[in-house]
Structure formats: C-alpha cells, structure tokens
Amino acid sequence: MIDGKVNSFFQYDALIENQIQALRSDWQRFVTERKHYKGQQVGHGRGIVITAGGLKYFTSAYILVSILRTFECTLPIEIWFHGDELSKNMCNEFEKLGAKCLNTEQFIEVTPGGFLMKALAIMFSNFREVLYLDADNVCLRDPAYLFENEEYKKHGCIFWPDFWQTPEHNPIWKILDVDFKDCPEQESGQLIVDKLRSWDQLQLCIYFNMKGADYYRFLYGDKDTFRFAWMALKTPYYMVPFDVGSCGVVHDNSFFGNTMVQHDCEGKILFMHRNLLKWDITLEHELVWKIVKKFSSSIEPKFCELKGGIDVMQAIDLHGDTLQYEFNDAFPGFERTCLKILKKVRSAKFYSHELMLSYLSNNRR
C-alpha cells in the first residue's frame, strides 16, 4: 500500500448481498456435488505444461522450449492448443525439441477462452506434478530443482506473487467466504501443482474460469483463480516470499519495465515473464533487458505504476526502496541467445507462410 491506498489496477464490480450469496451458493454446490469435467486425469510423473495458440505464442514458446533444452532440462514438455491454433509445421518444430503438442479439442467440444486454457491444460496433461509456464516466459536455468523444494513437498504447490493487491472491499472475499488477506495477488505465468494432492482445488479453479462471466468481474483473468480456489477450500498454499521485480530500459531517467522478474524459493532470479513485449514483435537486434529493478527490502511503502511505454502500449515502474542493476552483468549474453533463437525460427521456411496466414486471419474478421 501507499498513502493508505491499495496497489491495484483492476476495477471490480460492486454487488449487493443477495448477488454475493447466489454466487457463494453456486460454487459451494459445485464442490458438494463434485460434478467434475470429463477427460481430466491425475497423471504420472513430472513435466512442464505450456499453452501456445497462434503464431504470437508459438514464437514465444519456441524460445522458451529452446532455452530449456539449452540448459539440458530433461523434463518432458507438453504444448497445449485448441483446434487449428498450431499448424502441423509448428508442432513439428516443437517435436524436434522433444516437446509434444496436444489439442484440447480431443477433450472438449467448445472453444475454451484464453484464460480457461491454462487450468484445462494442467488438468488434461499426462503429468501428475506440473510446472506450468506461460508461453512468453523464459527460464534462466533448468527449473527442475523446484520439485525438490521443501515448501513444495509440504504444500503440494508453489505460487508466485504479482505486483498488485486485491482490495478488501472486492466482493470476492465475501463470495468465497474467506477473510481478507493483505498480501500480493498471484501471478500465474508460472506455477507448480501436484494434481494428486490438489485435485479438488484445481476442479474449483476450473469452475471459476468456466464461470468467467461471473468471476472475471472481480478477478483479472485466471491468475488469481488458483489461490482463491485454495483459500475457498481452506487449503494452505506456498507463495514465493520475494517481491516480483521488473526488467526493462531507462529512458530520460525513467524506468520502463517490459518483463516480470520472478525468483525461486531462495530469492534467486529464475523466470523472465515477458508479458508486455512479446517475442513476436521484437526486432532481432532489439535488446530490451537492460536494467533489473527490484524492491530492495520489505520497507513500506511499495508502489507499482502501470504507465505508457516506449514503442509498446504499457510499461511497469516500481517506486519505494528499490535497487537497479544491469541484467547482462548478472546473465551475460542470455538475451542475445534468445534473439538468436528468434532469428532462427523466423528464418525457417514455414514461418513466413504462417505469418501471412496470421495476418489474413487477424484482418479479415
């Protein structure tokens, strides 16, 4: 908080008491009746799940998977999409990297919204223990060691914090009949769950996303439906205790963050979630991971600002007790490695054809 105000950018709907009670009764009835969606499985073993529909997210996911294999990550990887979102050529490229493409069309007839895809991919996946990664995320080392973390073994899940907080007066607290928590929201660009230990919680999470017309009025997409499902069922979860940082550029003495910086459970940077500047619109020589900006302590106030960016629609800045350092000093050559992979995939024969199809699809609607 800063000056007594909650650090939030999301405008939620207000409800009267009988509307709150109706929504509460509906989700409680779902939990009681246990009417789960068909095709889901607990699965076996450990693996990485990524959702990547369309050329934009194919491009990002290709870089993510390539980097994982560069680090000699041996975890099996599933790439989930729906319908014709990925072409045969795209899937062939993933298969060359040892990743398997799977289509949710095999399990559900309706087209799931973008937010719903994440929870469904986790539940339909062949893995019992899932490290889910957004396609526009990148790992700075092999993340397999997270499965050995003691907090994960204790809770059966690891969540990561967002910049924002859910205000106390947001109706979601009353809808789910849980006490307000003065804590960060969840950022679901990466999460780990043991499906065997979290089955009911994940089912409720899917319910919230299936009922997105109701719940996205109070929550920004899927990201907080995970932790709120855990809270609604009175289940403890582990949230990484290190504030999310930002990576970007400095222009005219102002910081413009384009990537979320997330840490492992010991405080080391592990994930670069490129949520505001996707790889598909990045130039092949464009270095935008110049500066890492982080909160340097737990001292309040802390404040995150969403503002207009440079050559992108939005950027993030952090205010309070912060520190800055050069990204390339900490991870020499890493961004250039990503750009080399970007150049490689763009130079593939099939890519220009996919680009044309994407352009036509986006402009003939």
Image (cartoon, rainbow, N blue to C red):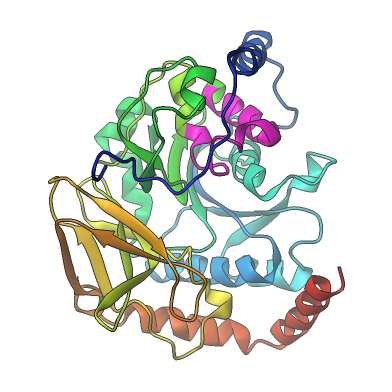
Per the image, is 219 magenta? yes
Q: Magenta region: which residues?
A: 201-226
| Image quadrant occupied by the N terminus | top left
| Image quadrant occupied by the C terminus | bottom right
Q: Quadrant of residue 259?
A: bottom left
Identified at 68% across, 71% down, the residue is 55
Identified at 61% across, 14% down, the residue is 31
- Decide whether the magenta segment is chiefly helix, strand or loop: helix
Q: Nearer the viewer, residue 97 or 349?
A: 349
Q: Is residue 63 visible?
A: yes
Q: Nearer the viewer, residue 152 or 53?
A: 53
Q: Is residue 198 visible?
A: no
Identified at 29% across, 41% down, the residue is 240
Residue 186 against residue 49 in the figure, above or below: above
Is residue 122 left or right of 74 when viewed as pictured?
A: right
Identified at 45% across, 66% down, the residue is 274
Per the image, is 129 magenta? no
